[in-house]
Amino acid sequence: MSGHSKWSTIRHKKAATDAKRGKLFTKLVKEIMVAAKQGGGDIEMNPRLRTAVDVAKSQNMPMDNIERAVKKGTGELEGVNYVEVTYEGYGPDGIAVLIDVLTDNKNRTQPELRLTFHKKGGSISEQGSVSWMFDTKGLIVLDHNVADEDDLMEIVLEAGAENLESDGQVYEVITSVADFDQVKQVLEDKNISWNLAELTKIPQNMIKVSDAEKAKKLITLFEALEEHDDVQKLYSNADIEPSILENLS
């Protein structure tokens, strides 16, 4: 299995089982607000909002919270004005790190993230230094018991997916941005449930990390960055040895 979403999958598992759940809800509300502000409050006409709402529902966010976030985004309720920023940097041993941020104050966020990088053995870099290493794709993660692999492969490829990968525990369906909603809809029409469905950034090449100490330094950086209230998503080209991740999860 590729390593591009393993950290993402573990992050969502952790958020569902510990005190980070409240922080996850805050990040999801921000995404819903920005999506509604940019494309309107109708999820049928706004793909980004539809994806944000689906992710919120998958994390069991109450509908009242979702509807309130949509209304704040459209201006029906008073809300904070967030702007989108992407920061690029390097972790220990030159591992690429890309961060999607929603902030109401860039002058506060950037120095705080720069300090976090510095404390954890990394550094923020110039715009464009890291982003070229990543492609934006659709990602759908499903439990391995939802379908036979050959049957699922046939379903998703016919629906327009680019690839299906498996590690024996979960499937990862990779799509283009354009085909993401269609593939997800086909799975829903066939009553095949998914754990995670989102647009993500996938590295073109992975760097294998099999040394436990180096992996722990990276994960310490990842966790510190994701603790920041303004950080929505974090991407990296680190392919951390699965056994190390499992021990830490």
Image: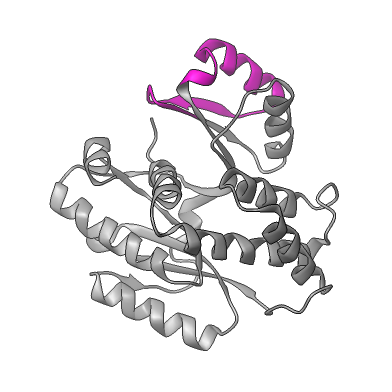
Residue at 24% x, 76% y is 119
In this orientation, does residue 120 appear? yes
Residue at 64% x, 75% y is 83
- Number of numbered callouts drawn: 0
In this orientation, does residue 233 appear? no
Left-right relation of 212 to 147: left
Left-right relation of 49 to 99: right
> Residue 181: x percent and y percent?
72, 38
Residue at 55% x, 27% y is 163
Magenta stretch: residue 56 in it?
no
> Residue 24: x percent and y percent?
50, 59
Which segment did they paint magenta? 145-171
The quadrant holding residue 85 is bottom right
Magenta stretch: residue 147 in it?
yes
Q: Nearer the viewer, residue 3 or 39?
A: 39
Q: Nearer the viewer, residue 43 or 106?
A: 43
> Residue 50: x percent and y percent?
74, 49
The quadrant holding residue 5 is top left
Image quadrant holding the N terminus, namely: top left
Against 149, is 43 above or below? below
The quadrant holding residue 6 is top left
Q: Nearer the viewer, residue 187 or 210?
A: 187
Left-right relation of 9 to 62: left
> Residue 30: x percent and y percent?
62, 67
The residue sitting at the bottom extreme is 107
